[in-house]
Amino acid sequence: MLPDETVPVNQYFSIPKVELHRHLEGSLRLTTMLDIARLHGVTVPASMFNLSGLVQVQDQDPMTFTNFLDKFKTLRLFYKSPDVIHRVTREAVEDAAKDNVRYLELRFTPVALSRAEGFPLHDVMDWVTTSAMEAGKKHKIKVGLIASVNRHESPELAEQVAWLAADHINDGMLGLDLAGNEAEFKSDPFRDIFKEAKQAGLHITIHAGEWGPAENVRDAIENLGAERIGHGVRVLEDENVTALARERAAIFEVCVTSNFQSGVVKSLLDHPLPRMLAAGLKVTVNTDDPSVSRITLAHEYQHVCDDLKVSLDDLKKSVLLAAESSFLKDAEKKKLVDLLRKELKL
Ligand code: ADE
Ligand code: ZN
């Protein structure tokens, strides 16, 4: 099988889907990377197989978060021009539409996209918002956007991103996310930024309890105002934090394959998602970085049902929950929820 291909279309393809947690930078097509390399003289291996090893997790790779994050270092070589940023944004939306995703909340990291070639942050924000909205209309998929800032990077830049995101609330920007190296960096320097972003009308989602302990889930909820938790799969390690997440109805954006590939869980079959459901937590199913992980959302739905033994009915309920937990405005959310309820027969 070519590295750019996925397993044969499975029955999960036909389920209408909602994606709350997908990074633009983890969604680049390999074929597009090769085009960019040719057009802009990026020195990369000429074959897809060799390029794949640099930007996608391989079966023989160490399943560690450093290996996972290293892929993004290579990916940064490709953000060469405004056209490239427009193109990868359009393609990320198109690929989600092809996977029968009805609502995509796509997150992107303006600092990563702007840094390589020194593009102004506000230009990057304009390029991504414009192309994402255009592609959404073209491919008949509803799209919302989230700006991500990394824990391991400067709070000053994060603050600029937060204000730019707030300025683009009417252009599809819905939220602010804290991502990056959770194992080594605390959220404290970002607290005020997230507080102000929330006051400015942005919704908040925080990567927590992925590469860091359950306590970080509490931190995300109590100190950063998180409505949703990116991953949060280590929450069960602390029953008090589990109880807090349940009481606050925190939404977990779980990404099964990503958790395996970045070493959070030792085996796919041991993923805590079913135990999170049993603990009464609100769980949604997402991809994180479909290109880096070489998956689609259909694959993740398949894992959840076939390998983790979640019933199809519970999976469909989690799709509806994802729609209900989207950062859309109330009227748009209701439209999406009504549509999915009908299509999923719930
Ligand atoms: N950036 C892209 N994928 C990520 C992940 N799984 N955790 C933290 N930051 C990320
Ligand atoms: Zn993520």
Image (cartoon, helix red, strand yellow):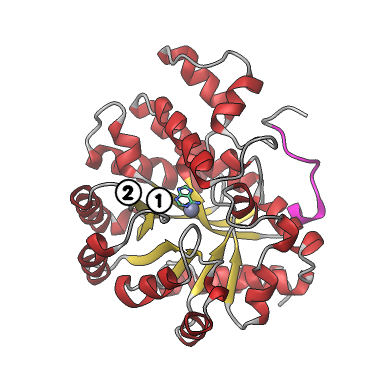
The answer to whether 277 is drawn above or below residue 256 in the figure is: below
Using the image, tell me which numbered label, if any, was put on residue 216. none
Using the image, tell me which numbered label, if any, was put on residue 152. 2
Identify residue for label 1. Answer: 181
Q: Is residue 13 magenta?
A: yes
Nearest the viewer among 40 and 138 is 40
- In x, y percent, where is residue 41? 42, 12
Q: Residue at x 48, y 77 (%)?
A: 250
**Element type at mark 1:** loop
**Element type at mark 2:** loop
Which part of the image, by quadrant, shows the C terminus?
bottom right
Q: Disc 1, ligand 1: is the CB inside 8 Å? A: yes
- For residue 292, say whether it is visible: yes
Other residues around mark 2 within 10 Å, as few (<14) / some (14–19) / many (≥20): some
Q: Main secondary structure of the magenta part?
A: loop
- Amino acid carrying label 1: it is Asn
Which part of the image, by quadrant, shows the N terminus?
top right
- The disc, 1 or 2, on the residue closer to the chain's N-terminal end is 2
In the rendered view, does 340 fall on the left or right side of 86? right
* Residue span colored magenta: 5-14
- For residue 335, say whether it is visible: no
In three-dimensional space, the C-alpha distance between marks 1 and 2, rounded to whole angstroms, equals 6 Å
- Amino acid carrying label 2: it is His
The answer to whether 319 is drawn above or below residue 239 in the figure is: above
Q: Residue at x 55, y 27 (%)?
A: 54
Nearest the viewer among 315 and 136 is 315
Q: Disc 2, ligand 1: is the CB inside 8 Å? A: no
